[in-house]
Amino acid sequence: MAADTKHHFLKITEELDEEEVRDLRFLCNDYFPIGKPMKSALDLLEALQQQNLDIFPELLYRIQRFKLLSDLGKRKAEMEQHLQQPGNCKISTYRVLLYNISKQIDNNELEKIIFISNIPKGKCQNIKNLMDLCTELEKKEKISPNNLTHLLRILGVIQRRDLIKKVETYQNEARVTLPLQESRKQQGSEICTQEMDQNIRCPAQVDAKQVISAGTNDHQEPQQASSTVDDPTAENTNFEGAACSSTEQKPNSIENLVSGTRALCMEPSQETSTASSMDSVPGSLPSSVWMISNNKASQQNMQSIEEYKMDSSPLGICLILNNKVFPGTNYNQRNGTDCDAEKLEEVFTNLGFVVQRHDNLTVQGMLEKLEAYKKYDHNNRDCFVCCILSHGEKDVVVGTDGKHLQIKDIRSLFSGSQCPSLLQKPKIFFIQACQGLSSQKACFITSSDSDLESDALPHSIPEDRDFLIVMSTVPECVSYRTRKGSWFIQTLCSCLEEYCSRKYDLLSILTEVNRRVSEMHPNIKQIPEPRFTLSKKLVILPPYLRTNS
């Protein structure tokens, strides 16, 4: 930097106060390691020069120091026009979003946000604004450009609907660039494949292969490894490497499925409409008129899908039965299950449930807890959730005493006749457990359509209506788990965090869970299995969306 130019910049930087320097430093977080100290604007400017980053004018524009911008020979209007051109913005939209939101948060709101974010006391004193807090959350990987669920939650707690809309607008605009996301997905897949090829040579992976080929009587857990075996046979394989396929790829399959379904139901293509109309149109009615009539009928049918009432506060009980150790039995310790339980606690608390967790129960202990919640008065609650994390065999889960508890007996406890306060309310069970000793094979999947007709609405309802039971795997097959949690529960929680705030119904979310789990590993396969008798659409919104919608 020439002496005159440096002197000119020095004069400008001297006019920036400490708060503005912190703002500039935050806006540059994508270019420098988070936490790298820069005490003055000159330090920041020199760091930018070392990396040949000509972004100082844009930084001044972002913090609205237009007088200093003009001292650099840049006019505000010219800068606005320059930044509107594709590729000219060097500060990410994500970073600008957090900066703008931070400037609208007062000190009282900041104190509340710090409290609910569980920031250690030693770091609280260094948090002067929301940008500082976001920096800490980024370090913990709680927020990122593709994951702002935690930010939405804390904005909901302080009831800042105006700022929530800003975040939602950012998310909607970010989802528009489908070709870029698809390209990123392919790159992420290649990276994950390379990582998995490296990890597959580790002892844990060898053990997983041995378990799969060992037959039906091997109940021993591998003793080496960074990942562990779950249930009677194996819940092994590399979850960290496989996680790339479910998180980095950021698939849009749910959006594509929903939009595609709407297109088929509400705006049929010419070819599809013509083919269907030729099969069923009365001879005296023109096909175009029939198409319009069918289209209107489809719209009416789509609009008539009823939703469960889901607005009580709290929404209901979320019961977690978490079995880790099985002393005196042939069942191995389920390392990693506490990670699942903790994640479920976090997710369902954020969704507005009262979470009750019980660890290491015998079959009798499990029955006692289930009986207690069967007798609980759910009249002022809209939903009941039960998560069971344990070993299992076909149609049963295992207590810590090694005894079996039939899944059908668990379900019957909450039927309409046994638990009338949950009548016509959704009863959801997530069960992480093996259902047998076999491993699933990778193969091509075929599908066929079927029609289900109903003649009339009943005056009474079946006592087994309104259940959703989601098994982590299909009958006869194993379920995989690592020391950081199981494939199924970790993916389920990730999808609930990602899609509940975007108002997807639960069955659509579970479809995405199925897809992600099924693609966890190129050779070792698992597919969850939802079983349901739901009679309405089930949408679980976070509290901040329910109270402000």
Image (tube, rainbow, N blue to C red):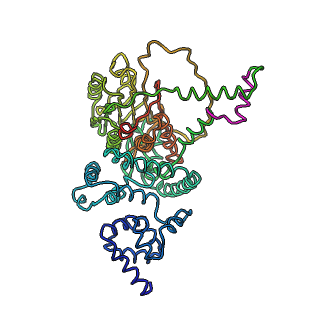
Task: Find residue 297 and report its horizontal and vertical position in percent.
Answer: 61, 25
Closer to the camera in the image, 58 or 77: 77
Along the viewing direction, whichever of 234 and 533 lies nearer the viewer: 533
Q: Position of residue 32 (x, y in %)?
A: 40, 68
View extreme (right): residue: 283
Quarter occupied by residue 141: bottom left
Residue at screen point 54% across, 62% down: 84
Left or right: 87 in relation to 134: right
Q: Position of residue 96 (x, y in %)?
A: 43, 60
In this rendering, the answer to whether 135 lies above or below 52 is: above
Q: Is residue 336 visible?
A: no
Q: Residue at x 44, y 31 (%)?
A: 538
Residue 537 image offset from top left, x and y in percent: 47, 29
The dominant secondary structure in magenta is helix
**Which residue is the extreme one toward the top?**
459
Magenta segment includes 129: no
- Give, as a single range, the part of the protein colored magenta: 266-281
Q: Is residue 270 magenta?
A: yes
> In the displayed image of the protein, which residue is found farthest to the bottom?
3
Where, by quadrant of the figure, is residue 49 drawn? bottom left
Q: Quadrant of the C terminus?
A: top left
